[in-house]
Structures are given as C-alpha cells and as structure tokens.
Image (cartoon, helix red, strand yellow):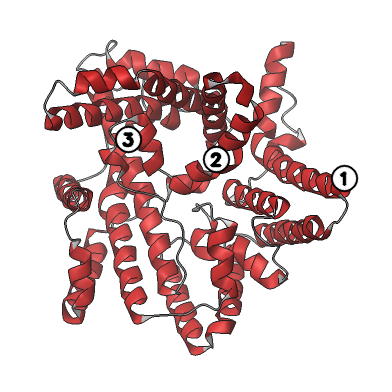
Amino acid sequence: MEFSSVEFLAFLIITLFLSYLVRPSYRWIVLLVASAVFIYSFSLNFLIFTICFALFNYAAGLAVSRSTKPVLKTFLYQASIFINIGLLVFYKYTNFLIDNLLALIGRSSLPTDGPYLKLIIPLGISFFTFQSIGYIIDVKRGTKPAETNPGKFLLFILYFPKFISGPVERTGTLLPQLNKGINWSEQQFYEGMLQMLWGFFKTIVISDRLAYFVNSVNGDINGASGAILILNFFVQFFYLYFNFSGYTDIVLGISKMFGINLINNFSRPIFATSVTEYWKRWHISLTTWCNDYIFKRVILKRIKWGKWASVYAVFLTFIIIGIWHGASWNFVILGLLQGIAINYEFFTKKTRLKVSSRIPVWLNLSLSRIFTLIFISVSHVFFFTKDLREAMLYFSGMFGGHGFSGNPVNTGLAAKDFILVATGFVIVLASEYRDETGKKPIRMAIINNRLVFWLVAIVSVAILILAGINKSAGFIYEQF
C-alpha cells in the first residue's frame, strides 16, 4: 500500500474517522489495528515477523528492567542487543558477507541453489531494529522505564506512518505520547494536513520526475556523455533531497493528524555550510541516535586517547551509518568519506575561521554551501551506483570518455515536466530560504485562516492530481 495510492488514501480517511470516534485513551488501539493492516497489505510474513520481533523486545525490556542481579541484568541486556543486531545482519548482510568471504578464499560464487540467495529483507528492519536497540539501552541505563503494556509497545514498533522509512523514533518521544492518551486538536490536524500535502508536492511534482532522469543516466553510465554525468552528479542529490524530505513531511504530517508528533528528520540541510552541519540537519533521527548510542559511548571508552578518541569515534560512527544504508562497499566508502570530512573540519576549524574572517560574510556563506554541496554530491555517487567499479566508471566518465557526446538521455518526460520540476524547485527552495532566514512562515498564515487553508488544500490536491505521473518512483529509503 503505497502512500501515493488511492488505497492508502481510503485507508487513511477510514483510520482518521475511527480514531476521532473513540476516546483519546483508546485511540492507540485503532492505530495498532490500522498499523497491522498496513503491514499486512505488503505481506503476512512481514507482519508476523515484526510482531514476533516487537514482542521479543517487549519481553527483553521487562526482563532487563526487573532483574535485580547485576550479572543477570548485564547478560540479558547483552543477549537482547546481540539478537537484535544478529537478526539485522542475518537478513541484510548475509549475502554481502558470503560474497566477501568467497573473494578471500578465491572463489567467485557458491551454487545458485544456496539458501542464502533466497533471503528477503523485512520492510523497515534497519529502522525498527535501531529503535528497539535504543529502547533496550535506555531501559538498561535506567533513563527510561520499560513499557508494561504489550499492545502499546507493539504500536511503538509497528506505527504505520513511520514503519517503512522512519524516522528512527526514541523511547522518550513516542511511548509517552501513547501512554498519556492521544489527544487530537483542530490546529494540529490542519498543520499535519498542510505538511502532508507539502510532502506530496515535493515527491509527486519534483522527485518522481527527477527519478526518470537519474535512473536513465545511472542505468547507462558507460554510454552517457561527460556533460550528462556532471549534470546528473547534482541532479541525483536533489532527487534524494526532495524524495526523502518529501517522505518525511508526509509521515510527520499524517502523524500530526492523529495527534502524535514524530521526530523531525530534516532542518533544511541544503543550507548547511559544512559537512558537520549537514549531518546535524539531514536524517536527524538517525544521526542523533548514532551520536547518543555509538559516538558518546566510544568517546567514554577511549577517553584516555584525548582528541584521537573523537577522531576514532567519528570514523566508527559514520562507517556504521554508511553500512546501515546497505550491504555494499560503496556504503562503507560513503561513511568513510563523511568521517574524513568531519575530522578535517575539526582540525582545521581555527584556520578556516581566520580565513573566513577576511572575506565578506555573504561570500563565505555562499562558498561554504557550494563546497558542502559538491562534497555531498561526490558522496552520492557511491550512494546511487551499485558497486565500486561502477562508481569509478562514473567519475572517470565525468571528465573523459565521451566528453560531450554519448547516448541521449531518454527520460520519457515532456517539456512540461521539466517546467514543473523547475517551478517546484523554485517554490520549495524559496520557502526553505524564508524559513532559514527566520521570516514568519507562510504556512502559519494559511493555517490560521480556515478559508485560505481549504482553498490552498483544494488547489494543492488539484495540482497533485494533474501533475501526477503514471507511476510513482517510490521512496528511496524504503530499501533500507
């Protein structure tokens, strides 16, 4: 059941209606049933797996919380973390590990009937695994109590708006909202609906069209001209940007309509002036999770190393973030590049501040944002290509090979589609620039005037229907 489908729209309207009919203290039950139906629409096996996974972590949290013997408490904690990581590694990284093991022993492959080739990665496993690990760690540390209601814990894991691609929710943000009773407010409903429509605008009008160009170029890197590869070098960054930020707006908007606030995953990362700042603005739920449960923990364990503890922790954290995205050496390189850039920024901070103080502020901001965009675009070559050989082929093709000749890019899009993309791009970037500069958001003026709100909503829906293309490209982060 895709978010952009008619089936999901009907499902959402029915769930909202039922949720508003019952008392606030019972709304979590409606959302739990709806979440189960949503996951079942993809696969019964996924639903069964996820329920079993959630119940295991529910029991593990209670066992860790109620254990009075330190040795037993530590054992239960470590065992539950090991099982969570083990399941993630088994489903997501088995083939990758086997392939590399075969390469080490000099064999190219095993028989094609090997069972490891038939593994299907459960939807959203990277997201709900990290969420569960964070919960277990919080319970072990005593910073958050263990959840005693199995139904509410199931909803904590299965909650349908964030199930497929996050955000990676935290124990202290979602569970308390479920426990105090889900209260709906008219203002929150309007805010959520407007944010959801804004997210659909980003994905349907912009990213779905950019997907045709990006997929066409990346599907024929060897035949594409250098000029096209350079253009795609930047286009694929904006494709991912609008796709994931659009998805996040849809998810957060839907959740607000139910009276639940999820973690904001984006804070205009396109305006970041450094790689360090970029990762504070991009996929915030993942980076803050890794900061709290990996980076800080490593720093404390290696505190005797002084500043080198930070260097080590940055590299380890971002390599894990890279691998979290997928089982490929490309993602290892992706994480390694971020570690290099962030450590470079740390050690050169004083020098860079001295240099920047000698040039105009506007020029310093502009250059910083451009250099950050170029670096992130370099990183995304590894994100969008299948392996290291293809990534190297992409880089070599940008500045050699066909030059400005090569196969034409067949996107299947008309001129009006490119006009729509350009118009949508300007609208979104203008809105984000307004927010970035601290001006009063236009959305608040829309929300506060009901007549204007419904006029904007009706026009937005009409635009989405008219601008929609035959098939949605889907959300990139679904694969993780």
Q: Nearer the viewer, mark 2 or mark 3?
A: 2
Q: Residue at x 13, y 28 (%)?
A: 363
Given residues 428 and 219, the one toward you in this image is: 428
**Other-residue count near label 2 (Cα within 10 Å), few / some / many at <14 / 14–19 / ≥20:** some
Amino acid type, residue under disc 2 in the picture: Cys
In the image, residue 371 sits, relative to residue 91, either above or below, namely above
For mark 2, what is the residue?
A: 290
Q: Nearer the viewer, mark 2 or mark 1?
A: 1
**391 horizontally vs 317: left or right:** left
Query: CA separation, marks 2 and 1?
Result: 26 Å
Residue 451 location, quadrant: bottom left
For mark 1, what is the residue?
A: 71
Residue 350 location, quadrant: top left
**157 horizontally vs 458: left or right:** right
Query: CA separation, marks 2 and 3?
Result: 25 Å
- Is residue 258 visible to the viewer in this orientation of the structure? yes
Q: Residue at x 54, y 70 (%)?
A: 177
**Other-residue count near label 3 (Cα within 10 Å), few / some / many at <14 / 14–19 / ≥20:** many
Given residues 251 and 220, the one toward you in this image is: 251
For mark 3, what is the residue?
A: 236
Residue 200: image location, x then y, percent: 32, 59
**Other-residue count near label 1 (Cα within 10 Å), few / some / many at <14 / 14–19 / ≥20:** few
Query: Do labels 2 and 3 touch, CB within 8 Å?
Result: no
In the image, residue 187 sits, relative to residue 228, either above or below, namely below
Amino acid type, residue under disc 3 in the picture: Gln
In the image, residue 192 sits, relative to residue 271, either above or below, namely below
Residue 378: image location, x then y, percent: 35, 24
Given residues 36 and 264, the one toward you in this image is: 264
